[in-house]
Amino acid sequence: MLTKSDAALLSAHWQTARFRLALDRVQVMAIINVTPDSFSGGGERVDTATALQRCEAALQEGAHILDIGGESTRPGATPVPLDEEMLRVLPVLRAAVTLGVPVSVDTSQPTLMQAALDLGVDIINDVRALRHPMALQRCAAHPLAGVCLMHMPGEPGTMQSLAHYDNVTQTVRAFLAEQAARVRAAGVAAERIVLDPGFGFGKQLPHNLQLMHELRQLLGLGHPLLVGLSRKGMLGTLTGGKPPQQRAVASAVAALAACQRGAQIVRVHDVAATVDALAVGHALM
Ligand code: HH2
């Protein structure tokens, strides 16, 4: 549970392109993967109509934000060529921005960021924290778009070999502080920026657990925290080897635990289970 002094560090709003999101209630960000190779999915190719049905279902279940991505970043994933990522994602974004809710694009590619912002997308969610050349400039040139900056050492192909830390929380905190300062210095207002410790990205189970236990230490950075624990490998391990599609309960519990430590946005596959867990957790605690 948050102490009073921790609670004082929570943010009131997240400014995004079309919506100023009030963070007095946790924002549930639904994951819409338009990838044939996501760790959490069935390995099938997802067409635009199917992706849109998933968006509508997620909203019915209570999602507040749609996060649409065309590149798998699971450990060992190979990069997707830019034109393929654009082909997968842009038609879905074009339709999603008509649904009346904030839309996020999960990408590190500046060209796709620009195309998405031109379509009216609200948030750039970049697991590489806008470190590709021109990514920061594209976001800074927009007056309002929200950005999510995540901690990941190296690239998805190599990150698990970089999972060595003296103190993972201190390393992640220092990284996020530096990236947020860099993004603010480029002209992105503080209220547009959220930070994400990057659970599972270049981290082993003990690192993920330590980060979760010490999540409050990231509150003092002055930005809202977004966490993505949904269906991740650590939950497979903790549930005795359950496959990704059977990790909904574990994911909802993990989301609630993160929110009790100050996370204000949760990125999830299982929206209905998460919404229930947060509602009950909020009422009981
Ligand atoms: N995790 C994944 C992808 N994008 N973005 C943020 N901000 N935080 C995360 O933890 C995060 C993320 C990986 O999960 P998923 O999209 O389900 O899998 P894949 O990358 O295999 O498509």
Image (tube, rainbow, N blue to C red):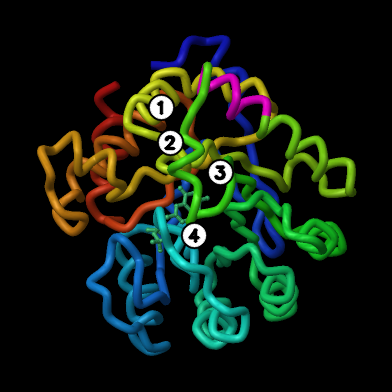
**In the displayed structure image, the side of residue 78 where residue 147 appears, left or right:** right
SS under mark 1 = helix
Mark 4, Cα crowd under 10 Å, few <14 / some 14-19 / many 20+, is many
Q: Which residue is mark 2?
A: 203
Q: Amino acid at mark 4?
A: Ile
Q: CA distance from mark 2 to mark 4?
A: 26 Å
The amino acid type found where label 3 is placed reads Met
Which is more N-terminal, label 1 or label 4?
Answer: 4
Which of discs 2 and 4 lies nearer the camera? The answer is: 2
Where does label 4 land, which residue? 65
**Residue, x 80% and y 61% (percent of image)?**
133
Which residues are drawn in magenta? Answer: 167-174
Compared with 186, 279 (above or below) is above
Specify which label sits upstream in the sequence, 2 or 4.
4
**Numbered mark located on residue 207 in the image:** 1
Task: Note whether 40 is above or below 250 in the view shown.
Answer: below
> Majority secondary structure of the magenta segment?
helix
According to the image, label 3 marks what residue? Answer: 152
Q: Is residue 242 left or right of residue 271?
A: left
